[in-house]
Amino acid sequence: MKKFSGSFAVTALVAAMSVSGLSQANVTDKDILDDQKTVEDVVSNGMGPRGQRYSPLDMINTATVKDMRPVWSFSFGGEKQRGQESQPMVKDGVMYVTASYSRVFAVDTKTGDELWEYNARLPDGIMPCCDVINRGVALYEDLVIFGTLDAKIVALDAKTGKVKWKKTVADYKEGYSITAAPMVVDGKLITGVSGGEFGIVGKVEAYDAKTGKILWTRPTVEGHMGYIWKDGKKVENGISGGQPGQTWPGDLWKSGGAATWLGGTYDPDTNSLFIGTGNPAPWNSHMRPGDNLFSSSRLAIDPDTGKIKWHFQTTPHDGWDYDGVNELISFDYQEGGKTVKAAATADRNGFMYVLNRTNGDFIRGFPFVDEITWAKGLDKKGRPIYNDTFRPGNPSAGEDGNKGSVVRAVPAFLGGKNWMPMAYSQQTELFYVPSNEWAMDIWNEPTAYKKGAAYLGAGFTIKPTNEEHIGVLRAMDPKTGKEVWRYKNYSPLWGGALTTAGNLVFIGTPEGYLKGFDAKTGELKYEFNTGSGIVGSPITWKQDGEQFISVVSGWGGAVPLWGGEVAKRVKHLNQGGSVWTFKLPKS
Ligand code: CA
Ligand code: CA
C-alpha cells in the first residue's frame, strides 16, 4: 500500500513538472538565430535578428484573411493607459509582452489568462522624452529581460516573473532612460540608452545575459573611450575613429547626445550589430560646426568587443532632430548574377538608404516621402546636398540674439519615418514602410548644457502638409527606389509593419484598426477596430496547427506630446492598453 502511494506521488510530480515546463521559456542562441523560420515561436524583436518582420506562414492569406477574428484580448489594466509600443514574444504557449510604465506580463496564448505581472517601481524623477512607453522584452534561457524608464535592465524568471538580476545602465537623473527592446546575441544582452534631448552621451553595452555582468561599453560620441572587461579588469577598446573634438567644437562632445534609443538588429553573416544613433545635442546646430560623429548614424558594431567596424552618417551636422536610429534591416538581392549583401533603412530625414552591409558603403538612396526641403538630394557617397535656406537660422545673427530665423523644414522632426519598424518580404522583395507626411516651423535659440535639463536650443511647431492624410504605408522597391503602392491614413502612422508569405502586410493605425493589405497590390483585405490606437508592432506564429496574429493596442507615444497642430488633429483618439490575438475559424 505504502509502495503504491509512493509511485503515485512520483507520477504526480512528473505531471507537475511538465505543466510548469509549459510556462518556462528555454530560449537558446540557436532559437534566436533561427527565429524567422521557426514559426511556432517569436523569440526576437523583429521576428528574426535581421529585423525583417517577415513570416513564412501562409494559412492566413489574401483569400482567407477576411474570415480572421479575435480569439482573446488581454487588458494591461490599472490607470497606466499610455502609449503601448511593444512587440510581444511567444514561447511554449506563453506570451511575454511589455506595457507603459515599465510593466511586463506573461499571458497564456490559448486563453489570454494572465500568468504573472512585473511592475517596475519607478522613481518620481524619470525623464522620458516621448511618453512612458516600452518596446518589448528579450528572452534568453529561462529569463525575460527588459529595460526600464529609470535606465535599468531587469531580468525576470520566465516562470514566475520574479527578479533574477538587475543592473543600472545609466543615471536617470542625467536624463537617461531605456525604452527599446534589448537583444541577445551569443549569450550577450545588448542595450542602448535614451535621452538625446537631455545632452546625455549615447552608448551601447553588452552584459552577460545569464548573470548581468558587464562585458563591454561603447559610447557613440566621438572622443569618448570604449571599454571591455577582461578577467574582471576594465581595458580600453579603442577610440574608434577620432580624438575628442575632431568633428565637434570645444567641449560639446562631452554632452553630445547620439542616443542609441531604439536598440538595433543583428546580422549573423557579418557578425555585426547594426545600431542607430540619435541627434547631436543640442538641436541648435550653429553651436557645433562639424559632422558631430557618431550622431545621426548607423553603426556596425562587433558584438564581441564593442568596436565600431563602420559607420554611415545619414545627417551629418544635423539641425532638425533627424535621429539616425531607425532600424537597418539586412537582406540579400541578386544583381548582375551576383548576390548583394545589403541592408536598408528609412531615415527620419525622408531618404531611404541601401548600404553594403559588409563595409557600410552607400549603394543607393532615394526619397520615400513626397516632400523634402532641407536637402536637394544625396551625393555619390550618400551625403546630403543641403539646401541652406531650410537650416534654422543662427540666433546670434538675429536682431536680439534670442531667436534665429524660422524655416519650414520637411519632414518634421518626428520624421518621414520614426521608430515604427518597416518590414521586408522575401516573397515580393519589397519593403513596407510606415511613413508620415508632415512639416515643421523650426527656429534656434541660445542654450547651455545643464545636467538633467532639456538641451535643445530650438522651438518648433509640427503641421500637416495636407488635409486628407498624414500617414502613408508605402511599398518600396529597394533595387529601383520606386514606390510600388501606397495606402494613405488620416492620422500619422506610429506602429510597425508585419509581412507574411500569405502575401499580406499588416499594420495598426491610431484610429484603432489592425489592417491587412495585399502585399503586391496594396488592396485593403482586412480591418478590425481594437478600441484604442495601435502604435505597436504585430507578430504572427503557429500553435496547434493554426496561425495566430497578435498586436498591442493603446494610443500614445510622441505624437500627442510633440505633434503641435498634428496633436490637435488627433486629440479625439482614446487611450487604452491591451493585446489582441486573432486567428481563422477552425471549420
Ligand atoms: Ca521563431
Ligand atoms: Ca531626438
Image (cartoon, helix red, strand yellow):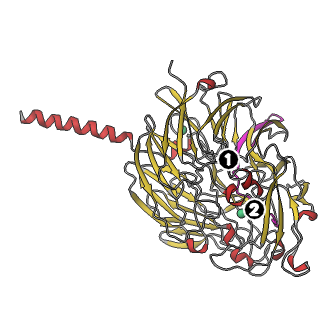
Residue with the most extreme front position: 572
**Mark number displayed over residue 296:** 2
Q: Is residue 143 above or below residue 562?
A: above
Badge 1: few (under 14), some or many (20 or more) residues near its Cα, within 10 Å? many
Question: Would you name the residue on which mark 1 appears?
Answer: 421
Ligand 1 closer than 8 Å to the CB at disc 1?
A: no
Is disc 2 surrounded by few (<14), some (14 to 19) or many (20+) residues within 10 Å? many
First-in-chain label (1 vs 2)? 2
Q: Position of residue 47 (x, y in %)?
A: 59, 42
Which quarter of the figure has residue 401? bottom right
Query: Could you say which quadrant of the image residue 280 lies in?
Result: bottom right
| Residue type of the residue flagged with mark 2 | Ser
Alpha carbon separation for disc pair 1 and 2: 17 Å
Question: Can you give x and y, in whole percent of width and height, for residue 208 in the image?
Answer: 49, 60
**Image location of residue 432, percent across then percent down:** 73, 39
Q: Amino acid at mark 1?
A: Pro
| Residue 320 lies in the magenta stretch | yes
Q: Which region is colored magenta?
A: 317-341
Is residue 478 rendered to the left or right of residue 119?
right
Q: Is-magenta flag for residue 554?
A: no
Of helix, strand and loop, which one carries label 2? Answer: loop
Position in image of residue 309 (x %, y %) = 70, 59
